[in-house]
């Protein structure tokens, strides 16, 4: 459970020979460019390799016709401390997600901590500690936004003010604590929003002993920023309630791996029928009783594209730019000035798809060839995905 050695990104890196450049932006998911220039960990230019090469001496990565996209964002995880999960008594789970292309994670609450404090002083202390710890410790280099207190009865607006002043920006899943009624949740979600904190609500049947069944009426009354695992974690609401949630608010529609696949497909199609695909974001809701899923985001992408028949270039946006914009992150998009958090991937060997988008449309998992965070290579060929048909190569230091 060691943090990666402190590294400084190269002053300049040219990424050339990109086969497909996927922006993460629904308004323009494919970019007409074959190269990216990275300077000091930030995207400095996007264009033709022959033009960007004139910027001066640089290290060179040959993408070997791989697709390059923003690193994936898991909108729903439950970390505890470091790279350990007591839910599965497993070390190294975050580093495993890095091998699945994930460069950023968002905590939905540090709920799995053994003996998790439920008194107000204790829950605030835990949230502040988690926020501080994961700001200082990035397993594998992955950016984990943590410190998401589980709401308990008796909290006052001052508690939210105190948390915000300490740097806490998230609220854990509403419904995992004693705050379960719509009116009470609405009041606390309002306090959180007033103090700049983003909220997520549990949706569907209970996931662990002590959590609650949260139906559409509670969600709509609480009005959280994110409808957490709208497809259940694991047990989903009836589809008429899911449609009501999609139609009845304008908040984030989060589809997770550890949920009901049929309900997830229904929610995604409902968002398209409403003309609002920008509301769809993806998570895993892990670690969980079903385990740790390093390829969870890729699997949801393949489900939505392959079974749901949604445009695969849009599905990439669900896992990157949609989440980045909804969560207020600086990563998640291929744009000048954004951090160089990049995923190099391609269709797996022997896929019937001719490129990564065709492979996703057929339901195949992409092969990950390299992952970069802040301009630093954190992972070469993935130890978890199928072998990629195109492998990036560092050709000049």
Image (cartoon, helix red, strand yellow):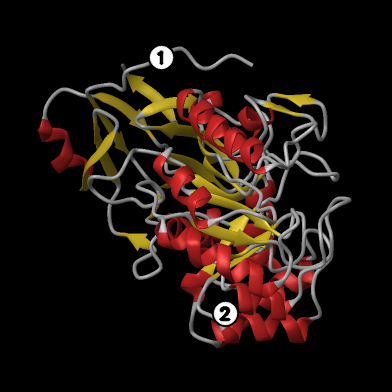
According to the image, label 1 marks what residue? Answer: 6
Q: Badge 2 local density, few (<14 within 10 Å), some, or many (20+)?
A: some
Q: Is residue 350 visible?
A: yes
Residue 131 versus residue 120 in the image, above or below: above
The C terminus, quarter of image: top left
Tell me if 119 is positioned left or right of 53 in this view. Answer: right
Q: Secondary structure at mark 1?
A: loop
Identify the image quadrant of residue 107: top right
**Residue at screen point 41% across, 68% down:** 26
Residue 259, horizontal then vertical, whole percent: 77, 60
Q: Badge 1 local density, few (<14 within 10 Å), some, or many (20+)?
A: few
Structural distance between the alpha carbons of marks 1 and 2: 42 Å
Q: Nearer the viewer, residue 32 or 278?
A: 278
Residue 337, horizontal then vertical, whole percent: 23, 45
Q: Nearer the viewer, residue 311 or 374?
A: 374
Q: Secondary structure at mark 2?
A: helix
Residue 273 versus residue 286 in the image, above or below: below
Residue 150 versus residue 301 in the image, above or below: above
**Residue at screen point 70% across, 41% down:** 119
Residue 90, horizontal then vertical, whole percent: 78, 26
- Picture disc at residue 271: 2
Answer with mark 1 or mark 2, whichever residue precedes in sequence.
1
Q: Is residue 309 visible?
A: no
């Amino acid at each position: 459970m060691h943090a990666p050695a402190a590294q400084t990104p190269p002053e300049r890196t040219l990424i050339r020979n990109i086969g497909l450049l996927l922006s993460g932006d629904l308004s323009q998911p494919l970019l007409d460019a074959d190269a990216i220039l990275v300077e000091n960990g930030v995207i400095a230019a996007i264009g033709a390799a022959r033009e960007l090469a004139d910027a001066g001496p640089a290290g060179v990565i040959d993408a070997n016709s791989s697709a390059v996209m923003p690193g994936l964002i898991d909108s729903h995880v439950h970390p505890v401390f470091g790279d350990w999960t007591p839910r599965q008594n497993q070390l190294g789970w975050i580093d495993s997600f890095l091998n699945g292309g994930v460069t950023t994670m968002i905590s939905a609450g540090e709920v799995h901590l053994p003996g998790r404090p439920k008194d107000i002083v204790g829950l605030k202390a835990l949230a502040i500690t988690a926020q501080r710890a994961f700001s200082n410790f990035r397993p594998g280099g992955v950016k984990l936004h943590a410190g998401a207190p589980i709401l308990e009865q008796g909290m006052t607006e001052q508690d939210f003010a105190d948390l915000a002043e300490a740097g806490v920006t998230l609220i854990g899943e509403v419904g995992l604590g004693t705050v379960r009624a719509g009116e009470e949740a609405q009041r606390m979600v309002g306090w959180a929003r007033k103090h700049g904190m983003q909220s997520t609500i549990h949706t569907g049947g209970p996931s662990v002993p002590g959590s609650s069944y949260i139906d559409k009426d509670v969600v709509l009354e609480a009005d959280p920023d994110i409808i957490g695992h709208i497809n259940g974690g694991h047990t989903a609401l009836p589809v008429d309630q899911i449609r009501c949630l999609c139609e009845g608010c304008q908040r984030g529609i989060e589809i997770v791996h550890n949920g009901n696949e049929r309900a997830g497909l229904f929610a995604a199609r409902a968002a398209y029928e409403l003309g609002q695909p920008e509301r769809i974001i993806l998570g895993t809701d892990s670690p969980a009783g079903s385990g740790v899923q390093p390829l969870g985001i890729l699997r949801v992408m393949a489900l939505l594209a392959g079974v749901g028949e949604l445009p695969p270039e849009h599905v990439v946006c669900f896992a990157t730019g949609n989440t980045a914009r909804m969560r207020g992150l600086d990563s998640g998009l291929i744009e000048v000035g954004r951090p160089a958090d990049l995923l190099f991937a391609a269709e797996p060997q022997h896929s019937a798809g001719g490129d990564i988008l065709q492979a996703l449309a057929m339901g195949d998992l992409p092969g990950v060839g390299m992952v970069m965070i802040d301009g630093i290579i954190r992972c070469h060929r993935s130890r978890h995905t199928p072998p990629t048909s195109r492998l990036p190569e560092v050709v000049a230091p």
